[in-house]
Image: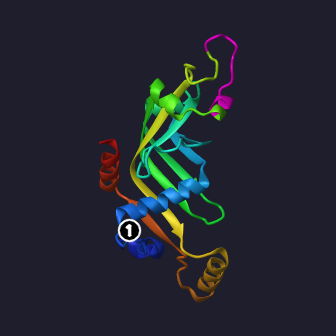
Amino acid sequence: MSDVKDLDPVTAKETNNDITPQAKIDGLKEIIKTVKMAMLTTRSSDGHMHSRAMAPCDPHSNTQLTLTFIGNNATHKFDDIEKDSHVNVSFYDEKSTNWASFSGIATISQDREKIKAHWTRLTSAWFGDLNDGVHKGDHNDPRVSIIEVVPEEIRYWVSTQNVVTKTANIAASALTGKVSAPGELRTITKSEIQLTEGLHTT
């Protein structure tokens, strides 16, 4: 049977070994910075996968690859994570067609120092004050928890052509039978992630 890369010419053009790990991280960070909103996908106990839009907190360093989210622990995503910690987080930039996909392990925390460090005035709008003296919608609200996604592999696509050139490239490829590859597919491996995460935690 043919290797997958032989059958998928776009995958065959993956540029994973042509640039340094830091250059790959820099390209990834640009996508996240532009998109800002992510889709967090979890698997429920019945096996169905569910996605929801969430805004990641700002990283504490330029090399941080672990994603941090603030969420309401009364929602289904927390039940999903407790049963199956394997998650996916994706970003997509409609204008450039750049995208990124994080496959990783999610953990849940109610570390108040972490919550306070990531808390903003706008965050309270997602919780609200229930006027019961406990659920005040602030960083001390017991509903507020941190979700940290430690990636095991990250793949992303970065466009190397502008919209006009890309459109022309696709049209020409459709006519000639050639493969349109107006961008680069990059992978940040588990070992590269571990090295990078180790650098900013020491």
Residue nearest the viewer, comparing 173 with 167: 167
Q: Quadrant of residue 131?
A: top right
150 relative to 171 in the view: left or right: left
Q: Is residue 158 magenta?
A: no
Residue nearest the viewer, comparing 173 with 36: 36
In the rendered view, would you say 184 is above or below 60? below
Indicate the position of residue 170 as horizontal and vertical percent values: 62, 79
Residue nearest the viewer, comparing 193 with 105: 193
Indicate the position of residue 116 as horizontal and vertical percent values: 52, 28
Residue 159 in sight from this viewpoint: yes
Q: What's drawn in magenta, residue-wise? A: 123-134
Q: Residue at x 49, y 56 (%)?
A: 29
Residue 45 in sight from this viewpoint: no
Q: Amino acid at mark 1?
A: Asn
Magenta segment's dominant SS is: loop
Image quadrant where one finds the C terminus: top left
Indicate the position of residue 30 as horizontal and vertical percent values: 53, 59
Indicate the position of residue 167 as horizontal and vertical percent values: 66, 78
Find numbered disc 1 in the image and state the secondary structure of the residue it sits on: loop
In the rendered view, would you say 81 is above or below 134? below
Q: Residue at x 51, y 40 (%)?
A: 42
Q: Which residue is mark 1?
A: 16
Q: Residue at x 50, y 32 (%)?
A: 117
Q: Quadrant of residue 155?
A: bottom left
63 relative to 191 in the view: left or right: right
Image quadrant where one finds the N terminus: bottom left
77 relative to 6 in the view: left or right: right
Q: Is residue 124 magenta?
A: yes
How many marks do you count on the picture? 1
In the rendered view, would you say 84 is above or below 164? above
